[in-house]
Amino acid sequence: MTQTLPREWAHRAPAQRAILWLGWFALVALFVWCWQIMSKDTIWAFVWDAPDQALDIGSRMMPPKWAYLPQLMKPLWDTLNIATLGTVGGVLIAIPVAFLAARNTTPSTTFLRPVALFIIVTSRSINSLIWALLLVAIIGPGLLAGIIAIALRSIGFVGKLLYEAIEETDPRQIEAITATGAGPAQVLTYGIVPQILPAFWSISVFRWDINIRESAILGLVGAGGLGLKMNASLAILAWDQVFVILLLILATVVLSEWISAQVRKAII
Amino acid sequence: MLKLKNLSKTYKTGDTALSDVTLEIDKGQLVGLIGPSGAGKSTLIRCINRLVEPTSGEVWLGDVDLAQLGRADLRHQRRRIGMIFQEYALVERLTVMENVLSGRLGYVPFWRSWLRRFEAEDIRRAYELLDRVGLLQHANKRADALSGGQRQRVGIARALMQTPDLLLVDEPTASLDPKTSRQIMRLLTEICAERGLPAIVNIHDVPLAQSFMERIVGLRAGTVVFDGPPTDLSEAALTEIYGAEDWNTMRREDDDDASVPLDIQDAAEVMA
Amino acid sequence: MSSYPGTWRRPPQIVSDKRVRLALQLGVLVYLVLALGSVEVNWQRVSEGLERGQRFIMGFLQPDFSSRWKDISQGLTESLTMTLTSTVVGVLVSIPFGIGASRNIVPRQIYVFCRAVIAISRSLQELIVAIFLVAMFGFGPFAGFLTLSFATIGFIGKLLADEIEEIDEAQVEAIRSTGASWLQMLNYAIQPQIMPRLIGLSLYRLDINFRESAVIGIVGAGGIGATLNTAIDRYEYDSAGAILLIIIAIVMVAEYSSSYLRKFLQ
């Protein structure tokens, strides 16, 4: 130990520490600045009044109006259909998009791959509720708008995860199939598809689970299902009905999450 | 049978993997390709079936120059070249039978392979080959359920399923223990002898190459620096291929690993 | 040679019982028929809509940023400020919840309580929470800020707790054996292990919060969603297209910069 030791031990070098402090300071300053802009128009009287409002709403929600439940069965069925059919539709479109987007399977990196990536980004950036909003305006309210909205949102999600799975396949297995003299379609079905199949099912079921949650509220903008009933109940301030709907959504979500977890466990 | 003329490969990065390799291999000949890592062994055999595109040179298989072929013709010719891989390269999630049948992919139309409706003749042959490599009762297992040695046997069966005229073998024993390595090498040499199949075997294990190969080609930095029977592989030749090293010590260590005493004698003979 | 069988069928991989498989296939078929049958489509309305759809696509291709720029910029400011403040507050609150929801370092009662809070936050949709908070706190970005903060607690809390439950126990043991207190243990054994993940998750949540901020405006919680809703209600598809393009652009920028930042911080 000929090296001279520093007199004082410090966790980080001074320059590093300075940058770290500066970073935190900038974050705090940014937060304060944003907070001021955001709460500029807030009416604080309403905010202080909120606990009373909460109590009021809470008391109106009790007791839940169980008699409303039978009327919710058809919307529940609709909600399940929006989620399931929407997932099926989205997945069917996502498959070719994913193959076009994956670096190792795309036929053209200069044109088709960017297009596929743009489709994925667009679909992912826009919430299914916004898609529904647009579609209700375009093709009118109803289940169809909901199904298409869910499908459009699912393309990006499934497409992204699937193309990542395709890019992570083992190239040696693909090389081995190529070496037998197989054609491109055969290399795809023998070399790549078996490798991504488990990921594919698990992604699809996972998205279906998310879609159940999303389809439950699509009705708020007119795309059918439970959300439609919720909108109607909110409009007449029937909080006891809203509460029943909420509990039903909660039960459905818990159930679908359980199913999705079971299926994914069975696949892996 | 196989003739390589002035074969060269330079990768996009500027690395030269092969320069001006000329080789001729006769029918039924087993050639061991040795050399340090990065000498271009793997590139050489991949240039033959063009999994790697050669930069220049000719690859004559019979009377066809593989280096000149278009896509469809290349696929057609690839059927004549069976390939066996390091770490097996089986499609892990398919059954053993599907892996063996995948050797027929170049022969059957897409719909047949998609529906797994192979012709009766192919299926019979697949069973026969599985029997030959000793895996008949494993036909319906998934490939990832097998041990390393068993997987490499499936790899051999898949290559033979192509009814090839030539075998390319890339480090067949790289991930196997010494005993299994010898079993696999023995199986390979037997099969080649049965069918009069020529084979090029990349192998990093010099004693193993010496005890199983009829001819050794030494590669160093992309050029052939040794070509002859294993008995000619003197210490000077090894130094030429691998650079200076205490070969006697290394061989003794290798022999200690080997589990079959007979082969130690072989190696000792070679050294003498 | 002819003694080998000439047929081979791929053995079924998941469901091995033939009857169960048939029943499953039949069940899927029946469901699809019933489900598709329950979708009532007013084709006349749809065909009318196609013309509007075309206009929307044109609006998307030729977006109009200028005529509603005042509304757009206000909505955008609200969305962005809401996103940042709610992520900061949400992450700060979710840290104690995340620690409390880790089975390996807290007593059982605290664990159950924290997991319950996280479960509630996760199972309630942002939009539903927003409806209630708007009813309580009035219209505007403040309700949106609260909604997103609440949703952040569930998201970060859950993932943080899962991370803490998977940490290397040997490090915790080593620090504990020095006689360190519980807080010192957190600081020395746990924090170093989870910090990179926490930063990554926070950046990811920032991204999600922005996307959500575009939605909750629909029920009155402020942000760009309200502007978008108005534009669509008025059939101003060129403005709507402009808003959507802005959202896509910001999400893309956020994604790239957060992946860059994560790389930089590690």
Image: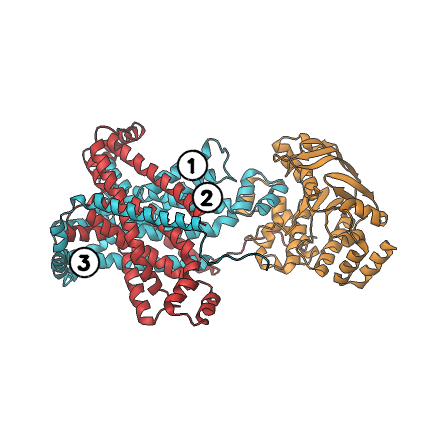
Chain containing the residue with disc 2: A
Residue A243: assigned label: 3
Q: Amino acid at mark 1?
A: Ala
The reply to whether residue C37 is in sight is no
User: How many neighbours does mark 3 have within 10 angstroms: few (below 14), some (14-19), or many (20 or more)?
Assistant: many
What color does chain B have in the rendering?
orange
**Which amino acid type is shown beneath numbered disc 3?**
Phe
Query: Residue A43: horizontal and vertical position, in percent?
Result: 13, 48
In the rendering, at what x and y percent does residue B256 appear? 77, 62
How crowded pointer 1 is (Cα within 10 Å; few <14, some 14-19, many 20+) is rated as many
Q: Position of residue C53 (x, y in %)?
A: 27, 32
Which residue lies under the disc numbered 1?
Answer: A116
Instruction: Please state, as top left, top right, bottom left or bottom right, where the N terminus of chain A lies in the image.
Output: bottom right
Q: Secondary structure at mark 1?
A: helix
Question: What's the distance in space between the residues labelled 1 and 2, CA to CA?
Answer: 10 Å
Sequence order check, earlier mark of 2 and 3: 2
Q: Which element is circle 3 on? A: helix
Look at the numbered discs 1 and 2 and tell me whether their residues touch, using CB distance below 8 Å: yes
The numbered mark at residue B48 is none
Instruction: Judge from the rendering whether residue A66 lies leftward or rightward of residue B48; answer left or right.
Output: left
Instruction: Count neighbours of disc 2 (C-alpha within 10 A) and say few if under 14, some if 14 to 19, many if 20 or more.
Output: many
Residue underneath mark 2: A163
The colour chain C appears in is red
Q: CA distance from mark 1 to mark 3?
A: 42 Å
Horizontal and vertical percent position of residue C124 = 26, 55
Label 2 and label 3: CA atoms lie apart by 41 Å
First along the sequence among labels 1 and 3: 1
